[in-house]
């Protein structure tokens, strides 16, 4: 009789343990997805805020300085210029800042190499508008930049993409 009781107890313990491990494994998976989603959202928000702030101050320098605020205006790349030391020449570190999408990583280069700002970028688009809010023909005509950034973790939750989209319009203050 004792052997039968022991076998029943071992079977019940095995079933309960398997159930507990399944619940713990699923909880860990959901936590990991949630943490990646939060990281993706925070990184995307910070990237858009930082890029918007740098676009607003592009062209900063002494009055009458003859340099373009936006040196390059491409759909996934922008080069901004600031005359931080006031000498009228864009040459010092940090005076030329490049933002560009490389693969799924948005990078910023202020003279020390292209540093990653946010990973998991699903799409990144820049639109350049003139004073009449039409497409700017050249980088020098751009007065407003529309930023659209879509981020998401590397995997899907329940076969649904979990993405976050950020979009903002930024007006150049110094042009």
Image (tube, rainbow, N blue to C red):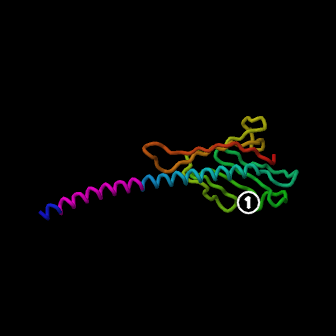
Whether residue 169 is visible here, answered yes or no, is: yes
Mark 1 lies on a secondary structure that is loop
Q: Is residue 164 left or right of residue 29?
A: right
Q: Position of residue 110 (x, y in %)?
A: 70, 58
| Residue that carries the numbered disc 1 in the rendered image | 94
Q: Is residue 47 left or right of residue 140?
A: left
Identify the residue at horizontal 86%, vertical 55% (top origin): 62
Q: Which residues are magenta?
A: 6-27
Number of residue marks: 1
User: Can you tell which quarter of the image residue 164 is in?
Assistant: top right
User: Can you tell which quarter of the image residue 20 is in?
Assistant: bottom left
Q: Position of residue 137 (x, y in %)?
A: 74, 38
Q: Position of residue 111 (x, y in %)?
A: 70, 60
Residue 133 vs 100, above or below: the answer is: above
- Asked if residue 127 lies in the magenta stretch, the reply is no
Identify the residue at horizontal 59%, vertical 53% (top origin): 42
Identify the residue at horizontal 71%, vertical 55% (top origin): 97
Outermost right residue:
64
């Amino acid at each position: 009789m004792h052997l039968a009781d022991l076998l029943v107890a071992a079977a019940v313990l095995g079933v309960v343990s398997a159930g507990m491990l399944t619940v713990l494994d699923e909880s860990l998976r959901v936590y990991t997805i949630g943490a990646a989603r939060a990281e993706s959202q925070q990184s995307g928000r910070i990237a858009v805020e930082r890029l918007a702030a740098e676009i607003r101050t592009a062209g900063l320098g002494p009055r009458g300085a003859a340099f373009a605020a936006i040196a390059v205006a491409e759909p996934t790349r922008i080069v901004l210029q600031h005359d931080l030391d006031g000498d009228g020449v864009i040459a010092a570190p940090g005076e030329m800042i490049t933002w560009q999408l490389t693969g799924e990583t948005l990078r910023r280069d202020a003279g020390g190499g292209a540093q990653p700002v946010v990973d998991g970028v699903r799409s990144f688009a820049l639109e350049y508008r003139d004073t009449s809010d039409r497409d700017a023909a050249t980088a020098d005509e751009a007065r407003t930049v529309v930023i659209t950034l879509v981020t998401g973790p590397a995997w899907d939750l329940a076969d649904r993409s979990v993405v976050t989209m950020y979009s903002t319009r930024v007006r150049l203050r110094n042009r």
